[in-house]
Amino acid sequence: MKKIALAAAVTAAATTAYAGNPEPAPIEPVVIVEDTSSSSAGIVVPILAIILLAAAAASD
């Protein structure tokens, strides 16, 4: 009888000990880093502008 009472007490203590945390676990935000692709658009637009200005100046 003592073993049954001891087993019941241990079981009751174990269930309340592992009942859970009232506050959710903190989740770290996922940081996504995207590599920028190299583009020739940064140089194409100024070159086209220079060509158009040169063509406009040459036509005068």
Image (tube, rainbow, N blue to C red):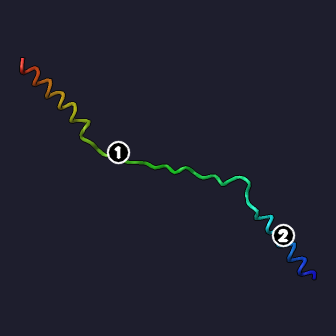
Amino acid type, callout 1: Thr
- Disc 1 is placed on an element classified as loop
Residues packed near mark 2 inside 10 Å, few (<14), some (14 to 19) or many (20 plus): few
Q: Is residue 9 left or right of residue 24?
A: right
Q: Quadrant of the C terminus?
A: top left
Q: Residue at the spot x=58%, y=51% of the render?
A: 28
* Relative vertical location of residue 46 with respect to residue 30 in this rendering, above or below: above
Toward the viewer: 42 or 19?
19
Whole-percent x, y for residue 53 in the image: 14, 23
Q: Which comes before the other along the chain, label 2 or label 1?
A: 2
Instruction: Please name the residue shown 11% across and 24% down the image.
Output: 54
* Left or right placement of residue 33 versus residue 26 in this view: left
C-alpha separation, residue under disc 2 versus residue under disc 1: 58 Å
Give the numbered dot on residue 12: 2
Which percent across, then down, holds residue 17? 79, 64
Query: Residue drawn at (25%, 38%), measured in percent from left and top?
Result: 41
> As displayed, is residue 36 above or below residue 52?
below
Q: Quadrant of the N terminus?
A: bottom right
Residue at the limit of the structure toward the top, as seen here: 60
Q: Which mark is residue 5?
A: none
Tag 2's secondary structure?
helix
Picture coordinates of residue 38, whole percent (x, y): 29, 44
Q: Mark 1 sits on what residue?
A: 36
Q: Residue 4 falls in which quadrant of the image?
A: bottom right
Query: Label 1 neighbourhood size at 10 Å, few (<14), some (14-19), many (20+)?
Result: few
Q: Where's residue 14, x and y in %?
A: 80, 69
